[in-house]
Every structure is written in C-alpha cells, then in structure tokens.
Amino acid sequence: MSERNLRAVRIGTVVSDKMDKTVVVKTNRRFPHPLYKRIVTRSAKLTAHDEDNECRVGDVVRLMATRPLSKSKRWRVAEILEKAK
C-alpha cells in the first residue's frame, strides 16, 4: 500500500463558530513585496470542518487541506493549538 501525500497545512485564528460543524478561520501570510521589498501582510478567511463543534472564537487552530466537503469547505481542523482566554 502506498503512503498518502502530504497535505497543505495552515495556522489561523477562529473568527466565527456560528455554524454547525463549521468554523471560519482567518489566516495571515507575510511576504516581501516584489518591487518595494517591504513586508506585506495578506489575510484569508477559510471555512473549515469542525466535527465535534469544539472550536470557539479566538482559538488558534491548525487546518489541513481535504477533499471538498461542501460548496465552500476545503479544510478541516487538525488540532486546536491554543484555546481562547
């Protein structure tokens, strides 16, 4: 049996947990601007599958890419790294 390929991984903060088994996670990426070389921050809001509804707003989570689960869900919560205070 062949080994499974590595999945894309992102780390972000939960910004909404209003849906059932779904959370919205904001991820930030920092990179130098191609021309001006200043550090630029870009963010993306990803919808992720949370099977046990255990994520709360403010939690820092690790997301893992998965097959399409719905129209917008392409990620799942792999683990909760830090609970909100």
Image (tube, rainbow, N blue to C red):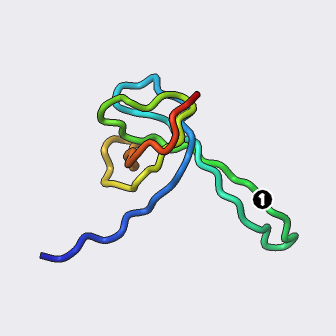
Front one among 18 and 54: 54
Q: Position of residue 18 (x, y in %)?
A: 46, 22
Q: Is residue 56 above or below residue 12?
A: above
Front one among 10 and 70: 10
Q: Which three-letter amino acid code belongs to the residue tagged 1?
A: Val
Left or right: 63 with respect to 38? left
Q: Position of residue 23 (x, y in %)?
A: 45, 34
**Residue reaching furthest bottom?**
2
Q: Position of residue 5 (x, y in %)?
A: 31, 71
**Residue reaching furthest top?**
18
The residue positioned 38% from the left and 49% from the top of the image is 78
Left or right: 28 with respect to 47? right
Q: Position of residue 22 (x, y in %)?
A: 39, 33
The residue positioned 53% from the left and 35% from the top of the image is 59
Q: Is residue 36 above or below residue 55?
A: below
Picture quarter with the C terminus:
top right
Front one among 38 and 70: 38
**Residue 21, located in which quarter of the rendered image?**
top left
Q: How many marks can you see?
A: 1
**Residue reaching furthest left?**
1
Picture quarter with the N terminus:
bottom left
Front one among 42 and 70: 42
Q: Which residue is mark 1?
A: 40
The residue positioned 51% from the left and 34% from the top of the image is 83
